[in-house]
C-alpha cells in the first residue's frame, strides 16, 4: 500500500506533501462518466464549479478518462478547448476568440427518442460468450448483445470532434495530452481503452463515436474490422483504470451516479434511480480502492435537485440548459460542503 497520507472522506484538493517536497504539482487524473445529452451538460456545469470553487481545471499534464458523454467531454478538452469555452457554446454565447464547436445541441444527438431498431439480436456472439464464460463477460454486458442493433447515427458527434481536432491542428493524430476513451468490444465484451498502449489505433473522433454507441439506440462503430458500443456497457466511469501509485489526486464526475438520490413517484424515474444505485455502488467501490491506497479523490454526482431537473430521459435536449445552470450551483454547494468536512476532519484527526 502506498505510504502517502490518506484522505478522510474525499475533501478538496490540497497540494500533495510528497510532491511539494519535490517541488512540483500533484499528479492528477480526471474521470468523466456517461450520462447522455444531459450528462454532458451536467459535467460542464460541475467542471465550472470545480474551477470556481477550487481553482481546479484539467490541464496538459493531467490524465483524462472519458466514457460516452464523458468521452465527448474528454475529446473536446483534449483538443485544448477550455471549460469556459464549452460552457459559452452550450449557452449559445461563444466569444469571438473561442474555438468553434460545430454542434446543434437540440438536433445533432438525434432527439430524445431512438429510431426504431432492428428486430434481431445485435450481437449473438456476445450473448453466447456470456453463457460460455460468465466470469469473463458480465450478465449485463452479455444481455446488451440481445438488444437489437441501433439505427441512430453518431456522424454528427464524430464530425464535431473531427472539426474541433482539426482546428487544434490534430487532424489524424491522437492528442498529445493523456487521453483515454473507453468503449466496449461488441463481440468479446471486453473493455477497450483507446489511447492506452496496445489499444487499436484510430482517430479521436472515431473513438469518441464508439464510446457513445448506446446499444439499441446508435449503430455500433467499426474500428479495424471490429464493432464497438458504448463504454458504459462495461463500466459507467472506469475509475478502476487509475493506478493509485501513479496519481495523487483524482476528480470523478459521474452524472449517472447519485450519492444523494431523490425519491420520485413516476415509475420511469423510479426505474432510472434503481440503475443509478447500481452505478453508484460500482463507482464508489473503485473510488474507495483509490482512497485506501492514499489517493485523494473528489467525487461529484448529481444531487436531488439535479435529478429532478434531469428527469428520467437523459437524452432530452430540452432540459439541457436548466441542467447546466443547476449543476453549476449544486456542484459548487457540494464542493463547499466537502471543504468544510475536510477542515473538520483535519482538526479532529490531525
Image (tube, helix red, strand yellow):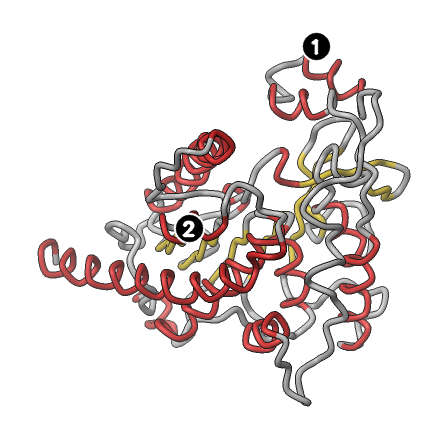
Q: Which residue is mark 1?
A: 132
Q: Is residue 37 left or right of residue 2?
A: right
Up-down relation of residue 331 to residue 166 (above or below): above
Q: Spatial distance from mark 1 to mark 2, Cα to Cα?
A: 36 Å
At 57% across and 37% down in the image, what residue appears?
235
Residue farthest toward the right in the current orientation of the protein? 225
Residue farthest toward the top in the current orientation of the protein? 132
Q: Is residue 276 left or right of residue 305?
A: right
Residue 284 x/y as whole percent: 39, 40
At 42% across and 48% down in the image, what residue appears?
308
Instruction: Tell me if mark 2 has few (under 14), some (14-19) or many (20+) residues whose alpha carbon lies within 10 angstroms of its own.
Output: many
Q: Is residue 323 left or right of residue 72?
A: left
Q: Which residue is mark 2?
A: 301
The quadrant holding residue 145 is top right
In the foreground, 244 or 279: 279
Up-down relation of residue 65 to residue 289 (above or below): below
Between circles 1 and 2, the one closer to the viewer is: 2
Instruction: Tell me if mark 1 has few (under 14), some (14-19) or many (20+) residues whose alpha carbon lies within 10 angstroms of its own.
Output: few
| Quarter of the C terminus within the rendering | bottom left
At 75% across and 26% down in the image, what residue appears?
188
Up-down relation of residue 74 to residue 117 (above or below): below
Amino acid at each position: 500500500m502506498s505510504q502517502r497520507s490518506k484522505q478522510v472522506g474525499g475533501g478538496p484538493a490540497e497540494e500533495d506533501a510528497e510532491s511539494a517536497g519535490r517541488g512540483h504539482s500533484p499528479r492528477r487524473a480526471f474521470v468523466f462518466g456517461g450520462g447522455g445529452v444531459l450528462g454532458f451538460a451536467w459535467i460542464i456545469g460541475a467542471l465550472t464549479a470545480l474551477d470556481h470553487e477550487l481553482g481546479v481545471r484539467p490541464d496538459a499534464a493531467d490524465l483524462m478518462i472519458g466514457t460516452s458523454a464523458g468521452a465527448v467531454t474528454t475529446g473536446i478538452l483534449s483538443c485544448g478547448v477550455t471549460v469556459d469555452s464549452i460552457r459559452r457554446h452550450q449557452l449559445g454565447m461563444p466569444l469571438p476568440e473561442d474555438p468553434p464547436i460545430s454542434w446543434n445541441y437540440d438536433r445533432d444527438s438525434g432527439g430524445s427518442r431512438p429510431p426504431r431498431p432492428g428486430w434481431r439480436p445485435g450481437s449473438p456472439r456476445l450473448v453466447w460468450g456470456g453463457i460460455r464464460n460468465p466470469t469473463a463477460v458480465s450478465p449485463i454486458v452479455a444481455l446488451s448483445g440481445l438488444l437489437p442493433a441501433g439505427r441512430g447515427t453518431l456522424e454528427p458527434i464524430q464530425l464535431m470532434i473531427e472539426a474541433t481536432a482539426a482546428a487544434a491542428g490534430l487532424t489524424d493524430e491522437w492528442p498529445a495530452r493523456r487521453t483515454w476513451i473507453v468503449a466496449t468490444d461488441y463481440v468479446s465484451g471486453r473493455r477497450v481503452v483507446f489511447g492506452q498502449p496496445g489499444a487499436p489505433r484510430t482517430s479521436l473522433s472515431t473513438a469518441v463515436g464508439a464510446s457513445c454507441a448506446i446499444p439499441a439506440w446508435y449503430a455500433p462503430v467499426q474500428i479495424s474490422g471490429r464493432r464497438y458500443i458504448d463504454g458504459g456497457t462495461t463500466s459507467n466511469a472506469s475509475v478502476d483504470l487509475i493506478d493509485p501509485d501513479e496519481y495523487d489526486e483524482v476528480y470523478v464526475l459521474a452524472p449517472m451516479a447519485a450519492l444523494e438520490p431523490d425519491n420520485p413517484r413516476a415509475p420511469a424515474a423510479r426505474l432510472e434511480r434503481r440503475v443509478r444505485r447500481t452505478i453508484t455502488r460500482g463507482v464508489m467501490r473503485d473510488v474507495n480502492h483509490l482512497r485506501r491506497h492514499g489517493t485523494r479523490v473528489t467525487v461529484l454526482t448529481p444531487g436531488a435537485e439535479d435529478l429532478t431537473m434531469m428527469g428520467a430521459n437523459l437524452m432530452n435536449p430540452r432540459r439541457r440548459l436548466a441542467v447546466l445552470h443547476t449543476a453549476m450551483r449544486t456542484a459548487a454547494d457540494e464542493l463547499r460542503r466537502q471543504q468544510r468536512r475536510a477542515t473538520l476532519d483535519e482538526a479532529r484527526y490531525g
